[in-house]
Amino acid sequence: MTAEIYDMARRARDAGRALGALSGAVRAAALREMAAALRAHTAEIQRANAADLADAEAGGLSGPLVQRLRLSERTLCSMHDRLIAVAALPDPLGVISNGHVRPSGLRVMRVSVPLGVIGIIYESRPNVTTDAAAVCVKSGNAVILRGGSEALRTNTLLAELMAAAAAAAGVPADAVQTVRTPDRAAVGALLQLDRFIDVIIPRGGQSLIARIAAESRIPVIKHYDGICHQYIAADADLEMAVAVVVNSKCEKVEVCNALETLLVDAGAAERVLPALAAALRAQGVELRGDARARAVVPMDAATEDDWSTEYLAPILAVRVVDGVEAAITHITTYGSGHTDGIITGSMALADRFVAGVDAASVLVNASTRLSGGGDYGLGAVVGISTDKLHARGPVGPDELTCRKWVAYGAGHLRK
C-alpha cells in the first residue's frame, strides 16, 4: 500500500511540474475535453453510480449521505457545465500582482504560480471528483483524489475518463489520479508524503477533518462545520425573508452552506415568524425554538446543543434576539465561520452585520446557498475553507496558486 501511494505521489509531482509549464490555452482545452468525456459516457457513469447507490443503501448509509452520493441528471449536467465554466475563467497563472523597477534598475515582480500537487480527501459527493480536477488543472496543479469507499466505482470511472481526456489535449495523464482502494491505510500513507504533495484539502465530516489535521505532515486547508445563520432584522421584507430562508434551508438540506439556525429580531417576530414557520413546515422542516420563538409559533423546544449543531437534515433551530448586536453575539458564540446572512432594508444595519460577523462568507438579502463558489463566479471549487491561512471561503483556481518573486538584473550586485 505505502509503495503504491508513494509511486502515485511521485508521478503526480512530475506531472504537476509539466502541467504548470503548459499554456493556459492547453489547460482550458483539457477541461473542455474532460467535459466532453463526461457527456459521451453519461450512461456508463450512471450505471457505476447506481451500483454504488445500491451498495450504500444495502449497507445502511444514512439518507443525507445517500443523497450526496446520488448523481441525478441535473447533477451530471451541472458537473459538465462547471468544467466548461472553469475552462472559460481567466488564467490564474502568470499574473503579476506587484511589479516595479528599483532605482538601481533591478526589475522586480511577484508572479502567480501553481502550488504543485494537491491531495483531496472527501466523502460521498462524486461531483467533488470533477470539480476538484477542474480547479486543479486550471490552476496548473496535479491532483490526487481519494473519495469515500461508498462512491469507489463512480469516482474511479470519473477520474479515468478525465485523465484520458486531459492526456488527449496534451496534459500529462498523471495530473489527475485517484486512489483506487477503499483501505483507510491509503489515507495515512498519503498524509506522510510531504516530499511530493504540497497541500491536503479534506471535505467531509468533522471526524475526517480532525483526523487529517492531526496526522498530516502536509499543510491542510480545512473546512469544518457549516453552522450557517440568517438574521431577520426588524425591518425585513416579509416576502423576501420567506423566500431567502426557505431557499437557504431547503434547496439542499445536506450541504455545508444550508441554513441551520434562524435568528429573528424581536421587533419582527410576530410579523414574520408565522409565515416563515408555515413555509418551512410545508417543505417538511422540523423547527426547534427558544422560549420566545415558541411563544409566537408552537414548535419543539431547542436545547443548548441545537445552537451548535450542523444538522444536514430538515431541522432548523430558531431563536428570537434583541437587535443586530445580539444576533452578532449569537453567531460569534455558536457559529463556525462558514456562511451567515442578514435580511434587511437598511444598508447601515447590513454594514454593521458584515463588519461584526467573522465568517468566510457574509450575505446581505441573499440565500446562504449562494456561497458555494459557482455563484461567486468561480466556476467550481474544491471546498469552502473556514481557515484564514492560506485560503478562506470558496477555494477556486486563484486560491490554489501562490506567489513567486522574479527579479531581472544586468549584473546587479548586493552592496
Image (tube, rainbow, N blue to C red):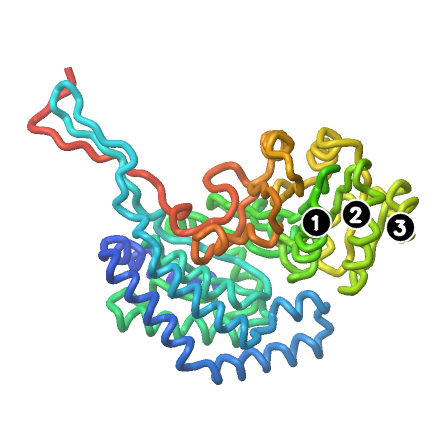
Distance between the alpha carbons at the discs numbered 3 and 2: 10 Å
The residue at 84%/42% (across/down) is: 304
Relative height, residue 330 to residue 39 (above, below)? above
Label 3's element?
Answer: loop
Kind of residue sitting beneath label 2? Val
Kind of residue sitting beneath label 1? Ala
Q: Which residue is mark 1?
A: 241
The x, y position of residue 289, in whole percent, is 85, 47
Q: Earlier in the sequence, mark 3 or mark 1?
A: 1
Relative height, residue 54 to residue 339 (above, below)? below
The residue at 50%/54% (across/down) is: 375
What numbered label is drawn on residue 297?
3
The x, y position of residue 196, in whole percent, is 37, 51
Distance between the alpha carbons at the discs numbered 3 and 1: 17 Å
In contact (CB < 8 Å): disc 1 and disc 2:
yes
Distance between the alpha carbons at the discs numbered 1 and 2: 8 Å
**In this view of the protein, which residue sits in the foreground, 207 or 410?**
410
Kind of residue sitting beneath label 3? Val
**In this view of the protein, which residue sits in the foreground, 69 or 354?**
354
Within 10 Å of the Cα at label 1, are there few (<14), some (14-19), or many (20+) other Cα atoms?
Answer: many
What numbered label is drawn on residue 272?
2
